[in-house]
Image (spheres, rainbow, N blue to C red):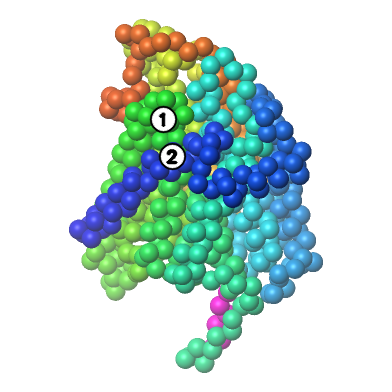
Amino acid sequence: MTANGWLQFALFSIVLLLFVKPVGLYLARVMEGERTWLSPVLRPVERLIYKLCGVQAEAEMNWRQYAFALLGFSAVTMVFTYAIERLQQYLPWNPQHLGAVGPDLAFNTAASFTTNTNWQFYSGESTMSYFTQMMGLATHNFWSAAAGIVVAIALIRGIKRTTSATIGNFWVDMTRTLLYVLLPLSVISALILVWQGVPQNFNAYTAAHTLEHTTQTIAQGPVASQEAIKELGTNGGGFYNANSAHPYENPTPATNFLEMWLIFLIGAGLTYTLGTMTGSKGHGWAVCAAMYILFAVGFTVCYWAEAHPYKVIHNAVQTQTATAPGGNMEGKEVRFGISDSALFSTVTTDASCGAVNSMFDSFTPLGGMVPLSNIMAGEIIFGGVGSGMYGMLIFVVLAVFIAGLMVGRTPEYLGKKIEAYDVKMAMLYALIFAFIILVFSAIFVLRPAGLTAMANPGPHGFTEVLYAFVSGAGNNGSAFAGLSANWWLNVAIGFDMLMGRFLMMIPVLALAGNLAQKKTIPPSPGTFPVNTPLFTVLLIGVILIVGALTFFPALSLGPILEHLLLNARQLF
């Protein structure tokens, strides 16, 4: 651990927090239909889209209609991407003449990008054509990101509104999110990436003749445009197999900083959007503080673990190629080092972004447990675009409910009574997530098809399996690697991702609809304030307790056991 490493963390934190208010305020104005600096240019385009698509912008939806529109849109776009993958050999922009993607892998990939997961059981440069990358995958990076944002906005509206039967119009919310937020920011970010050396072309792959008199194939493609929305939308799917460790996706320290900042940008801004739209900016900052504290603790543990490798590993690698005096450099890029690798891994798993600039499989057990625990917490530490906010609001409801029980009064949240139905929806959200992960993981390790896919034995192999289903259900998409893809795993993780996305969105929208119908009551002496440091502490405590009660036994069989065995000098 070095002063330079901590300086980079401090600089990232300052830049991130400086943008919370302007981004959050802009998001609130966009989603409420207020005038912004882009309105003179984009408002006519917005109206034209409504006219061409037959959208009645003034007609709002109840939560069931909103959910039906969301599910229908996602289903149609998933079929669209599946068809592109299966037919890519007949489609344009395929200079390498790549063939059709197999049916099970095409299903897995279509489900992955539809759910904002971007889990990849393939190498992009050898499997997907340029057309598939752009029309099938990059488009979903926009659609799935927008879907998460609009669900969060719908829940915030439910908290804000009084005796309302509606929570907004899905088609209007999607259009505004895409047009005013994701597209402009992606264009600017892509241009910066091109300036830093990220390719953006349609060239065939380059055959380079090396000094050793061999030929090296260097993949090309429209990388920058996909890289920008990949990070901004917390998607994470890499154009190349090496993802953000590849020098074409992440060539410089400047691009590494930009990509981490983009991952957190909208998730952090939504905390201020929450405070602005509900009229309680203090509450927004209290939620932001809880997220930041959890982020800082996670980075500290990961950085410490990677900077202090186990003696048995150090002694086993006498050349010190895997374990240098400065810490564990195995699986890390020299241009990023330990601190930026730990920071990137913490950021990408705090958010539902599977982008990686290092290999988690090569992390120390405690270092690797940080990304795993981040996803197990529900990726609510700033989180995915939208999904982090509505996931955190579920914990807010639970925290308010627990606070009400402690003082013996009906729980209240920003003037709304939290009643049995609200708590049931919040608990349904939490239970679905845990059920999907633990059941799929148990089935996998008991099936011969699952065991044959494992490349590593013992607790490390179990961690790889657990991480795969945690990453799928959490819509993260990063992996511990070590698993060989087969049709069963493709299908299982495909359903894992779909259930983790849409079965959890439905209780959120139901909660939004129920809160919108309630009357607002004035605060009383027994009302627990949600804009104080005490609330931040309570919220963090609820998150940690729920996570520990749910997943600690599984963690004990994986990274914790491996840590203890490595201290006893047993390698895996």
Which quadrant of the structure image shows residue 317? bottom left
Q: Is residue 218 magenta-colored? A: yes
Asked if marks 1 and 2 touch (Cβ < 8 Å), the reply is yes
Examine the rendering and report whether any part of residue 135 can be seen. Answer: yes
Q: Is residue 102 left or right of residue 517?
A: right
| Horizontal side of residue 316 vs 135, given as left or right | left
Q: Quadrant of the rendered structure where residue 555 is?
A: top left
Q: Which mark is residue 275?
A: 1
Q: Report the residue marked by disc 2.
A: 24
Residue type at numbered disc 1:
Gly
Q: Is residue 3 above or below residue 220?
A: above
Q: Residue furthest right?
A: 90
The front one of 370 and 38 is 38
Which residue occupies 66% across, 66% down?
Answer: 130
Q: Main secondary structure of the magenta part?
A: strand
Q: For the C terminus, which image quadrant? A: bottom left
Q: Please, is residue 33 above or below residue 519 in the view?
A: below
For image coordinates 51% across by 11% down, the residue present is: 519
- Residue 386 appears anywhere in the view: no
Give x and y (percent) for residue 557: 41, 42
Distance between the alpha carbons at the discs numbered 1 and 2: 9 Å
Q: Is residue 73 left or right of residue 473?
A: right
Q: Secondary structure at mark 1?
A: helix
Relative image position of residue 122 (x, y in whole percent): 61, 61
